[in-house]
Image (cartoon, grey):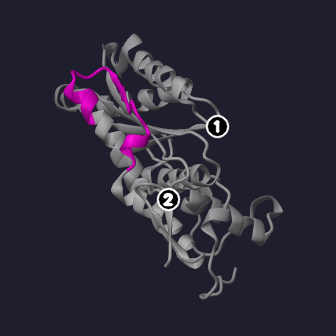
Amino acid sequence: MKSLHPHRHVDVDALRLGSALMLIAQSGQPVFADAQAPQDYVQSVIDALCDLSSRDPLTGLSNRRAFCHVMEQELDRVARLGDDALLLMVDVDHFKPVNDVHGHLAGDKVLQQMAQRLLTCIRPMDSVARFGGEEFAVVLPNCSHSYSTVVAERIRQAVEAQPFELGDGKTLSLTVSVGGAFAPQWVRSGVSLWVERADRQLYRAKKEGRNRVCLEETFDTVVSTEEKELLYGALNLTGLANGHATDPEHHTSVGQS
């Protein structure tokens, strides 16, 4: 099988996900099982690479890299359509003692079970990922403010309600802290700003005693300076093109003399 052209680029966003087994097992000249066409084999290898690069190997959830792409897409949709979109950051309370006392294998079991509980709490349209360590993240498109508390509390209660299996008949009761923030509507925001806003609420939940949900109580007042500049900068450029400037504080136009 000839190698691919060295200057040919692959559109990663357009690739399908698949199994990594074929990629790992093959070496040297590939063997096309069941009369598999060369192009199909190449696609299966690409599928395997894409799956490896987007999945957390421990939990099977999306990894941080893939999830950031999901957040970027959702921020773009909210900026264009003005729909609601909620980001939840979920952190396991007092997770370090789990590893220290019961061992890292027990900690891995906890994270795997945590992933499964999160999946049972969300809709098919939602996205969940292992964001790092014992922290998970969930993006909920078309999530109204009234529903945000419901889903966040559903996650918290699902973790608290049932002990985690550690193996050898041992169980452990754990809780999570949840922080949430909505994507700013009609504003070209960024992933880091959205995560920072949700993290701020997560830290507040930790500070107030853990095993609780903290969501932004008001939306308009928490739009950051950077996001305002992204919005008003575009408005100012439009105004200048039409022969007048826009005042971002008063939302009025000042004509040129």
- Can residue 129 be seen here? The reply is yes
Report the residue at 45% width, 23% height from top: 155
Q: In terms of sequence position, does the residue under pointer 1 or pointer 2 come before the other?
A: 1
Q: Quadrant of residue 85?
A: top right
- As drawn, the label of residue 252 is 2
The Cα–Cα distance between marks 1 and 2, rounded to whole angstroms, is 39 Å
Report the residue at 32% width, 21% height from top: 212
Report the residue at 54% width, 60% height from top: 24
Please say if 251 is above or below 155. Answer: below
Residue 216: say if magenta.
Answer: yes
Please say if 120 is above or below 256. Answer: above
Q: Nearer the viewer, residue 201 or 22?
A: 201
- Secondary structure beneath label 1: loop
Q: Nearer the viewer, residue 151 or 41?
A: 151
- As drawn, the label of residue 125 is 1
Crowding at dot 2, Cα within 10 Å, few <14 / some 14-19 / many 20+, comes out as: few
- Name which residue type carries label 2: Thr
What's drawn in magenta, residue-wise? 203-223
Q: Quadrant of residue 178?
A: top left
- Name which residue type carries label 1: Met
- Can residue 25 be seen here? The reply is no
Report the residue at 54% width, 47% height from top: 185
Q: Nearer the viewer, residue 25 or 67?
A: 67
**x and y, in percent, of residue 145 in the image:** 52, 29
Q: Nearer the viewer, residue 194 or 146?
A: 146
User: Quick one: quadrant of the N terminus?
Assistant: bottom right
Left or right for 181, reference 47:
left
